[in-house]
Amino acid sequence: MRITLGVTGGVAAYKAAELVRRLQQEGFTVQVVMTRSAREFVTPLTFAALSGQKVITDLFAESGGEANLESAIEHIAVAQRTDLLLVAPATADVIAKFARGIADDFLTTLHLASTAPVVLAPAMNVNMWNHPATQENLEMLRVRGVHIVQPDEGYLACGMTGPGRLAGQEAIVAAVHEALKMQRDFEGETVLVTAGPTYEDIDPVRYITNRSSGKMGYAVAEAAVRRGARVVLVSGPTSLDVPPGVECVKVRTAIEMQQAAKQHFANASVGIFAAAVADYRPSEPLEQKMKRTKEPLTLRLEPNPDILAGIAAGKGSRLVVGFAAETDHVAENARKKLSVKNADLIVANDVTAEGAGFDLDTNVVTLFARDGRDLPLPKMTKREVAERILDEVARLRTTLRAA
């Protein structure tokens, strides 16, 4: 697993070098991100030598360096591949920025771009630690699920005595494991995910499809494997890369998707059906290319199988999640689909809304659960939506098992 270690400007920055080694001994790959102030205490070369990874020090290419698109969006790339963001030492300044959503350097921008769990190990002067502003910021972060490693008490570099010393390696490593354990709540589960469109052939060069990019389903698959699940992704045609650790079965038509989904759901505990399956297919696809004429053309279509309803009918105690892309009466249609399809959760959105719909990196959805809970979500990245879907699946699993 990959940890991004943020090192901020304090005397305790030198201890982060020892922490890199310890994390590597625990089996983690560590990439270090340093703030400008941290470089006053330890050089990037030290961390590069210890970690064997590039050390990131600036949001953009350094002065005199070659600016390019890769450097401009590197925080997004790092955010997508990190499994946990650890900041040690975390100064009062970076704690305040994290709490208030300020993004003025690589580390703080990475924090906003990442959906990975966050662990902060504060280190600062005792008065700074006890200041009401610092304590308020820490409480805001705790409410959001950030793990705070309580600093040790003792003699500080400033000459004062009290809380503020960077916690020991054992405490920090324990917090890292705890944060990852909490996020790996699908350990031992097999999750089936369908994604993308289907292609229904008219002839060898023409087909019926829709505008689905597959991004939502791929985001769900990536999030599920990160949370410990074995993931089988049944994917229609897309241009997306298969997330690391995900088993992918490529299909083209709705019939092929139905067969693959049925086969792999037999060994799954959760099915998340995010694919935009074509509702109809040509009744008699042609073996040769159809020639253009001046006459009107009538294309005879027949309905495709309802994959969600068919599989959910025999789901037993397994959980099934469906998607509803609507253009009107979203809540009414979603609730109806939840019942008719025998699903446990429907992820519904108005595809005409700004920031929602096909081929976007964001989505605006409402989760409609079988136990009556409706959970509207603001505009989020599809990665963030994927995490919230899995959160709701985990909640339903606990609720239904206790019933």
Image (cartoon, helix red, strand yellow):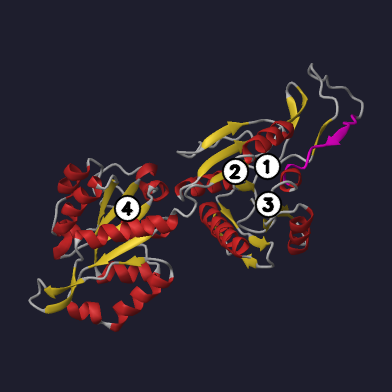
Pick whichever of labels 2 and 1 is earlier in the sequence.
1
- In this picture, which residue range is highlighted in magenta? 297-308
User: Which quadrant of the figure contains the N terminus?
Assistant: top left
Magenta run includes residue 104:
no
On residue 323, the disc is: 3
Please tell me how crowded label 2 is: few (under 14), some (14-19), or many (20+) other residues with Cα within 10 Å: many
Magenta run includes residue 301:
yes
Pick whichever of labels 2 and 3 is earlier in the sequence.
2
Pick whichever of labels 1 and 3 is earlier in the sequence.
1
Please tell me how crowded label 4 is: few (under 14), some (14-19), or many (20+) other residues with Cα within 10 Å: some
What amino acid is labelled 1 in the image?
Arg
Q: CA distance from mark 2 to mark 3?
A: 18 Å
Residue picked out by circle 4: 59
Pick whichever of labels 4 and 2 is earlier in the sequence.
4
Residue 307 shows in the view: yes
Which residue lies most toward the bottom here?
Answer: 132
User: Which quadrant of the figure contains the C terminus?
Assistant: bottom right
Q: Nearer the viewer, mark 2 or mark 3?
A: 2
Residue picked out by circle 1: 211
Pick whichever of labels 4 and 1 is earlier in the sequence.
4
Q: Locate residue 329: give its quadrant.
A: bottom right
The answer to whether mark 2 and mark 1 are in CB contact below 8 A is: no
